[in-house]
Amino acid sequence: MRDSPTDFTAIYEQHFDLLVGIAIGRFRISEGDAETLAHDVFLSFLTNAERVIDRERWLVGAICNASRNHLRRITPTEPLDPQAADAADPRSERVSEALADRLAARQMYDCLTPRCQHALRLRYIESYTVPEVAAALGTTKKYAQKLISRCLEQAQRRSKLPERT
Amino acid sequence: MMQRVAEFVSIAHRLIEERSAARPIVDKVRRNPFAFLNRDVPREWRTAGMAEQLTVAAAELLEQAPDKSAALAELATNVAATLDGTYPRITRAQIIASAWKELANAHRYRSDYDSALRALDRADDALRDEPSLSYDTAVLALARATTLREIDRIPEALRLLHFATDVFRSHGDEKRVAQCELLAGMIHHRRGDAVQARRAYQRALEVALAGGDPLVAGSVYINLGVLDAEGGRTSDALDSLHQARAIFTELEAACEIARASWGIGLALLGAAKHEPAIPLLRDARESFLALSMVEEAGLAGIELVEAHLALERREIAREILGAVIDEFRDASLNERALVALAYLRELGPEARRESVQHVHAYLLRLRREPALLFHPLE
């Protein structure tokens, strides 16, 4: 940790709004909780700072994970309806199609370069916006959009899936 | 917000000061950490910076001296336990978890997997209920996955590994991602999937070389070397293993230098080049003994026995076998290993290489399945 105390103030002030904004905007966390989470993320950064290469990317990753963990903790759990045990799982109605889709998606995903896997995972599985993908990848919004398009093309090209009717 | 910025800056400043105050003390302690165990933690040591620097020293000594590393990590856990409420809850949790994780690593290096897992439990306890510490939690998950792979608890290891990889990727920590890829390769390797293992190793190597992480690069080269040796590609195997040894020599990582030499010796042994294999296996064995890595030393000893038997030097083979038995007994290792070794000794001058290879394969499995019974060759 080679930064001077002045730098620490700047780190906090430069990124605080971004982190709180992500927690509120993407994860619907209340402002008070979002600020507390962001502060904890900054504190956790201090003991890891030596390893961090891209500070913004690290902090964005940390607030996203912190927000998810926070939501998991506060989401109440309710016992299952006793009749639910006998009911068929509605997801099993299209199980063979769903399984085929999942296998196809997995096959397509495995064909991609690690960078494309990461970009598509952020965009379509983690539901990042394009600017957030850009921040996570340490690049510009324009390049992130271009990368996502290129990765989708790569997925189509490489997957060589048989057409399904 | 001003109050929070002030707390952040103040703790940052405090950590910097504590680290610089701790460094000269830790420099002294690391020469003989055993002398400081079982003592009360001195008042001036009770800082986060001190616990952190002891943990750093433990990590630095892990490769060269696992015993010292364990002692330093134990001191770090003791110091971390004394930290008071003037530190933020997050910082205290991180310091405690990190110290226990380093102790777990030292236990793992000494093949004490139960103690390693117990230490990781303590580390996990420290981070429980801290939603903002996913990165630190992932570091623990990687350490646990590494330990679980060594004892063949593969599904658990894979689950943790996927979690850790995702978290490191989301934080942009490519070095840790490379460590995860390396471990993924080792898991595929253990399962016998050479194609997937090679892919994972090569991904790890690319990231490690690009990110300037020689430790991971060296480890990948060792594993690629072993993979090639197993596939009968001795020349490729030797290239990778020599690369690994050069990297670890540069890093002065005694433990990994011994592993690389061991790998070269094994590749030569596999290619029936017994004479040149012997000095390498002997050097590796001696290094392992000096590092208190008795199991590895024993395995290298059995391989030496095999090489000498192949060259009809039965008397030397018998002496080495006797020494291995004594070492295992002195170290109180698994009784079943002693049974297998005693069987080999009872075969006496008539011991065949097949019997030696059978015992060697059993000892390797025994590390992962400690309750496995030994059955002599028919």
Image (cartoon, rainbow, N blue to C red):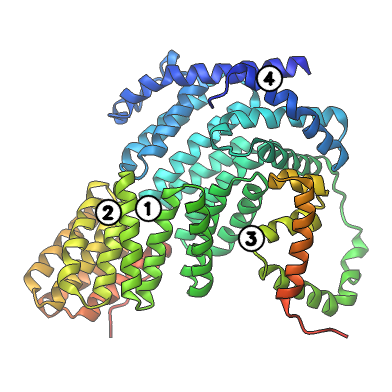
Residue located at (92% from left, 58% from top):
A81
Instruction: Please rate how many residues cluster around mark 3, counting C-alpha atoms within 10 Å: few if below 14, some from 14 to 19, many from 20.
Output: few
According to the image, label 1 marks what residue?
B111
The chain to which mark 4 is attached is A
Identify the image quadrant of residue B131. Answer: top right
Work out which quarter of the rendered image holds the N terminus of chain A and state it. top right
- In percent of width and height, residue B46 lies at 48, 18
Q: Which residue is mark 3?
A: A114
Q: Amino acid at mark 2?
A: Val
Circle 1: is it few (<14), some (14-19), or many (20+) Cα within 10 Å?
many
> Which one is earlier in the sequence, the residue at label 1 or at label 2?
1
Residue B370 seen in the current view: no
Q: Chain of mark 2?
A: B
**Residue that badge 2 annotates:** B294
The reply to whether label 3 and label 1 mark residues of one chain is no
Q: Nearer the viewer, residue B110 or A35?
A: A35
Disc 1 to disc 2, how far (Cα)? 9 Å
Q: Which mark is residue A9?
A: 4
Q: Report, in whole angstroms, how far the alpha carbon at label 4 lies from the one at label 2.
A: 51 Å
> Are circles 3 and 4 on residues that touch, CB within 8 Å?
no
Do the residues at discs 1 and 2 belong to one chain?
yes
**Amino acid type for the residue under numbered disc 1:** Ser
- Distance from Cα at disc 3 to Cα at disc 4: 35 Å
Residue, x 26% and y 52% (percent of image)? B288
User: Which residue type carries mark 4?
Assistant: Thr
Q: Secondary structure at mark 3?
A: helix
Secondary structure of the residue carrying numbered label 4: helix
